[in-house]
Image (spheres, rainbow, N blue to C red):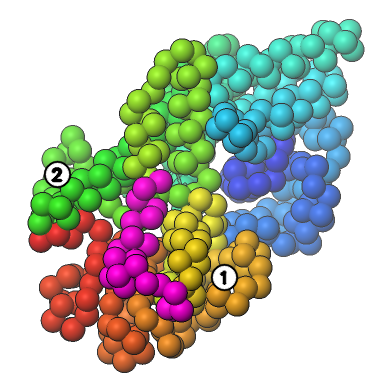
Amino acid sequence: MKVTVFGSGYVGLVTGACLAEVGNEVVCVDIDEGKIARLNQGEVPIYEPGLDSIIERNMAAKRLHFTTDVDFAVRHGLFQFIAVGTPPDEDGSADLQYVLAVARSIGERMEEYRIVVNKSTVPVGTADKVRQAINTVLNDRQKPCEFDVVSNPEFLKEGAAIEDFMKPDRIVVGADNPRTTELLRALYAPFNRNHDRLVCMDIRSAELTKYAANAMLATKISFMNELANLAECLGADIEQVRVGIGSDPRIGYHFIYPGCGYGGSCFPKDVKALERTARDVGYQAQLLQAVEDVNDRQKLRLFEKVNDYFKGDLKGKTLALWGLAFKPNTDDMREASSRVIIEALWEAGAKVQAFDPVAAHEASRLFGNRSDLALSDSPEATLKGADGLIIVTEWNVFRSPDFDVIKAELSSPVIFDGRNLYDPARMKALGFDYFGIGRGA
Ligand code: UGA
């Protein structure tokens, strides 16, 4: 089948590459000429395990094309996926200018039936706006032309996006025309094996499903972080509580890991946008506000522990910091807790020596060259001359370090662990002062 994908960012690239991988002819179009030129030279602009090889293979097979030629792109695909960014406006609502610009581009060039598929995370009601934008342009052109708009949100996790696309838990299709649903069913057939994963619904419900999923996951995390802080006050261990509640299948083990806050390009943005949507229709979403507030506070939790340990005197101290990315297996530092912690340490007069397996270049892009930030090329190198160690991201390489080396290098043997990687009793036996999240027992 012929597919066009607008936007060669994270979602667009994964969608385009995976649809090509199963035999479709895919054209990915972006207005960023530099990006398209790099992609055509085989350079993938994002770090996502497995993506490069799929792109390379399908470009070689001539099933995957990158272009800035919008005329060609609209002519090409029966399916016109919109996968452009929806950055938050100042008030937290999603900025739809890029989505609507693509809709107009399609309307300006469309000559025959097209299915416009919204993949970007967009507020409820966006499909109507997309339809309206296309209709307005078609009317101006005096060109009656049939089209349908579909909401087909993505549920990809960074670092596992290929797997998530190839073996989805569910494929949500919001459509108001049964014929469109059937065409989407055919397109997704290669990913819809063993049992039917297509969940068909009306368009607005599909749009809300995306926000509901992310907001629910964010709520689970903030709930656990709240409980972790309480466990510290009560002398209980949240890790034991986690296992205790997770064993109830109604609660489950997933996404109940306490830590130093959630980050990334989705949860913080989507919780805010949903809250804003609620406000727009006159509903005050108190729980969502609390989820966000708890998370903002949690990102400072490790800093507070460091500050308390050094009795509020961090001037001239150096802290080793492991993990800059908002989670493992990505170089993404958007809304990462590391940024909040590092800024707070700087503010208090401390220096930071950081290591991340892949995000160092992103950190230097964000922070530039600063005398109070050293980016090391190994976890051990961060420890030299440091007063304590802070762990922010649970990369596997941090799970079983040489504790003798850590102890020998740090001027005070103290670890602040934002991901509860180690057993507090063992750390105590090894002679460390060890502070996790919610480990009050
Ligand atoms: C999230 C969702 O998991 C995807 O289903 C969704 O498609 C995606 O957003 C999106 O809307 O595009 P992602 O942002 O890649 O995916 O990352 P997650 O793996 O969900 O992690 C988000 C944050 O939550 C990370 O900072 C992680 O450290 C934190 N987290 C996660 C916890 O603190 N505790 C947990 O138990 C789980």
Pair 2/1: label in front: 1
Q: Is residue 414 above or below residue 109?
A: below
In screen coordinates, is 5 left or right of 22? Answer: right
The residue that label 2 is drawn on is 245
Q: Residue at x 22, y 80 (%)?
A: 432
Q: Horizontal and vertical percent for residue 239?
A: 18, 56
Q: Residue furthest bottom?
A: 408
- Judge by depth and name the residue closer to the eye, 287 or 206: 287
Q: x and y percent of residue 389 in the render?
A: 36, 75
Q: Which is nearer the N-term, disc 2 or disc 1? A: 2
Taking the image as shown, residue 352 lies to the left or right of residue 101, namely left
Residue underneath mark 1: 360
The magenta stretch is: 296-318
Separation (CA) of disc 2 from disc 1: 37 Å
Which residue is located at x 37 percent, y 62 percent? 303
Quarter of the figure with residue 74: top right
Secondary structure at badge 1 equals helix
Question: In the depicted view, which residue is nearer to us: 331 or 111?
Answer: 331
Residue 263 among magenta residues: no
